[in-house]
Image (spheres, rainbow, N blue to C red):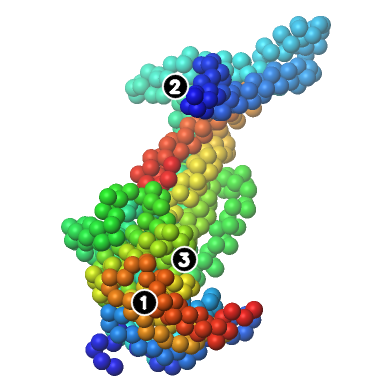
Amino acid sequence: MSAQTAIDIRNLSLTFQTGDGPVYALADANLTIAKGEFVSFIGPSGCGKTTLLRVIADLEQPTSGSITVNGLAPHEARLKRQYGYVFQAPALYPWRTVEANVMLPLEVFGLPKAERRVRARKHLDMVRLSGFAKKYPWQLSGGMQQRVSIARALSFEPELLLMDEPFGALDEIVRDQLNEQLVKLWNETRKTVVFVTHSIPEAVFLSSRIVVMSPRPGRIIDVIDCDFGAERTLDIRESPEFLKVAHRVREGLRAGHSYDD
Amino acid sequence: MTSVALGSPREASASHRTWDGLRRGRLVPVLTLTAIVLAVWYLACLPMNRDLPQLARVEGFANRYEVAWSLERPVLPAPHQIIGELYASTIGTRLLRETAGGLVLNPRNLLTHAWVTISATLAGFVIGVLLGIALAVAVVHVNALRRSLMPWIVASQSIPILAIAPIIIVALGSIGIVGLLPKAVISAYLSFFPVTIGMVKGLTSPDAMLLDLMRTYNASATQIFAKLRRPAAVPLLFASLKVSISISLVGAIVGELPTGAQAGIGARLLSGSYYGQTVQIWSALVMAALLAALLVALITLAERLTLKAMGTRP
């Protein structure tokens, strides 16, 4: 494992004990993610992609195997606030303004007020919401709310960004816009991003590597390299190269019985 | 012209618009209901009072009603009699009385009694709310307490307050505590409960995602409480406070009954029933209702201001 490794996952398994017997959420997963990569986990629901992300974030504990995050155990990485997490829903606090929501982690970390303000402004700029600092979440559209939650995750400048289907609840037009903005953001910051999705075009468009997963038990079927350059726009989705990668993802999902009943 | 065609339904006459506004507003329904209640009340005065000796020899429907609406000690007084008594015993009576020790509140004025009851209500409310919040915080944060304390909290409310009130008055009286405090204790005994239930619900209302978010920040329990649980509980706290303040008033009135009726709304109710002064009882009841409405209105105002300051969607 080199210094350039962000996440290293070895023989990782996770079994939930439920009333109906054990559920094998993850079985023998192996994956290494280098610093600066944009890696997507794709697969149908129940394939363990969110569970894997939550293990990286130390929100779930693996049953067996090993995992390091920036060279640390996930627990230590969480204590050292090494990652920012973006949830499926914006998860904004309704009684806080947009700015105060972005400052929430900085308050928890005990940063001085002036510094909090500077950082909040900078990251709201980054997601192009500077004019909305004093608004409350309910005054914003769903897409804008999710951008606030991205600014919040970036506000303490973690090296690693974990995103759990952040655009899943948005309509396709907003989703396209945010995909383009996210690529730009990634190019500017070059953070390591782990991105969970169930949309093939989204995964192919955003990622530098795609991890195809399948359910029962949750496992990694295929890892596909994919890079359409920093300057890509949504137009590349009609190019033959793009369709070729999308086809391979779909083949992977089919081989993992993702399309079976 | 399209704009005129579209606008025409809205260009109704001014009177029509006023009528529309009234119909949609609350004023007309409230007034209608009040009128119906008053009509039924006035009509009921005759059948309710028909066994009284003053009505025994009165003939004729109109005459009988006239007498029934102006009896001195009716079973059911007419609304205007209650309003008259309310007026006479508040604005019509001096509030302050000169004694050897200086000016004191006149016990003949109903407002004196209202003040006695209100002060016990507010003292009991403050104690009850603080106790209720403290219990809720403890129950939410300590798992063992959730299992051990909650059944006791619920059981405390299954004891009839009329049974426990004299015990509290006598027990505190025997160690020299009399006056406002025993009544406040009874008030608090009733009013902490809705606060505890509402706050437990409110403090546990943030969903798993919001709690996970705090976990990713490695936030301490104190930070989670201050930044997430406490603000999330505010709307439910106000809902509880409205219930709590009105039963605080009930507690204070109940607390005034076993003391032998010295002062307060409860004392007026008791002395009214000793001497068969039904009009006095009713006016004390109306005063209690007015006080409750005033207290709930104050909480509602505080609620509006707080939620507005918290940026809640109007």
Q: Amino acid at mark 1?
A: Ser
Residue drawn at (58%, 62%) of the image: B151
- In this view, the mark in front (1 or 2): 1
Count of marks placed on residues:
3
> How far, Cα to Cα, is label 3 from label 2?
70 Å
Residue found at x 42% / y 40%: B304
The C terminus of chain B lies in which quarter of the figure?
top left
From the viewer's perspective, is residue A203 above or below residue A24?
Answer: above
Left or right of residue A75, residue B178 in this image: right
Considering every residue shown, the one lying at the far left of the view is: A114
Out of B51 and B30, give the one closest to the viewer.
Answer: B30
In the picture of the structure, the residue carrying the numbered disc 3 is A168
Residue A136, compared with residue B112, is above or below; it is below
| Residue depicted at x 54% and y 47% | B190
Work out whether residue B219 or residue B277 is closer to the camera in this orientation and state it. B219
Left or right, B134 with respect to A101, comes to right
Q: Where does the image place residue B106, in percent across and percent down from the top left? A: 44, 21
| CA distance for labels 1 and 2 | 83 Å
Residue at image mark 1:
A207
Position of B122 relative to A129 (above/below): above
Question: What residue is shown with label 2?
Answer: B106
